[in-house]
């Protein structure tokens, strides 16, 4: 989930807002009809100086739902952290996390959807792969 700072920053930058909407529309083939309509409507609002908080939240939610990342906050490689979490998954506290890690590995061994990055980071912290202090500072 996007932070308040990121939501507010993109809301006040209509050029970046429109560029992100256009990028998502052009590069994500499996958008819902509502998401396509929402992203397309951004183009028609070319006279706006800034967008609403709700529009920003939805834009970043669409990005987070579909966009894949190769790096976690703090510069950690998804490929490495995902592999290490998979190898140590039996030490995770939650059974659902164990299954989730297996699903992520089956989906991709090198990338993860942005919306899953926080959960992967949490699992990595739990397994001692990422230091709590460093991760919080990043």
Image: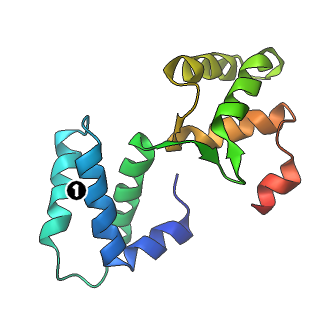
Q: Residue at x 58, y 25 (%)?
A: 109
Q: Secondary structure at mark 1?
A: helix
Left or right: 137 as drawn, with respect to 72: right
Please identify the residue farthest to the left as the structure is shown: 44
Q: Is residue 136 visible?
A: yes
Give the colouring mode of the picture: rainbow
Compared with 102, 64 (above or below) is below
Exactly how many numbered labels are in the figure?
1
* Closest to the observer, 12 or 70: 70
Compared with 20, 47 (above or below) is below
Examine the image and state in which quarter residue 116 appears: top right
Q: Position of residue 18 (x, y in %)?
A: 27, 68
Q: Position of residue 68 (x, y in %)?
A: 47, 41
Examine the image and state in which quarter residue 98 appears: top right
Compared with 119, 43 (above or below) is below
Q: Residue at x 50, y 21 (%)?
A: 107
Q: Position of residue 59 (x, y in %)?
A: 35, 57
Q: Position of residue 114 (x, y in %)?
A: 51, 44
Which residue matches tag 1? Answer: 39
Left or right: 47 as drawn, with respect to 124: left
Examine the image and state in which quarter residue 65 appears: top left
10 Å crowding of disc 1: few (<14), some (14-19), many (20+): many
Name the quadrant of the C terminus.
Answer: bottom right
Left or right: 12 as drawn, with respect to 25: right
Q: Is residue 52 visible?
A: no
Q: Residue at x 29, y 42 (%)?
A: 28
Q: Residue at x 16, y 73 (%)?
A: 45
């Amino acid at each position: 989930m996007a932070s308040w700072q990121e939501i507010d920053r993109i809301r006040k930058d209509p050029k970046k807002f429109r560029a992100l909407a256009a990028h998502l529309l052009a590069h994500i083939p499996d958008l819902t009809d509502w998401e396509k309509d929402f992203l397309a409507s951004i183009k028609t609002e070319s006279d706006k100086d800034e967008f609403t908080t709700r529009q920003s939240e939805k834009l970043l939610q669409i990005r987070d739902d579909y966009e894949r990342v190769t790096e976690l906050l703090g510069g950690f490689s998804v490929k490495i952290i995902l592999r290490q979490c998979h190898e140590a998954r039996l030490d995770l506290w939650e059974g659902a996390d164990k299954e989730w890690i297996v699903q992520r590995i089956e989906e991709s061994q090198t990338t993860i959807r942005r919306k899953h990055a926080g959960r992967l980071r949490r699992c990595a912290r739990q397994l001692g792969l990422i230091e709590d202090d460093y991760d919080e500072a990043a």
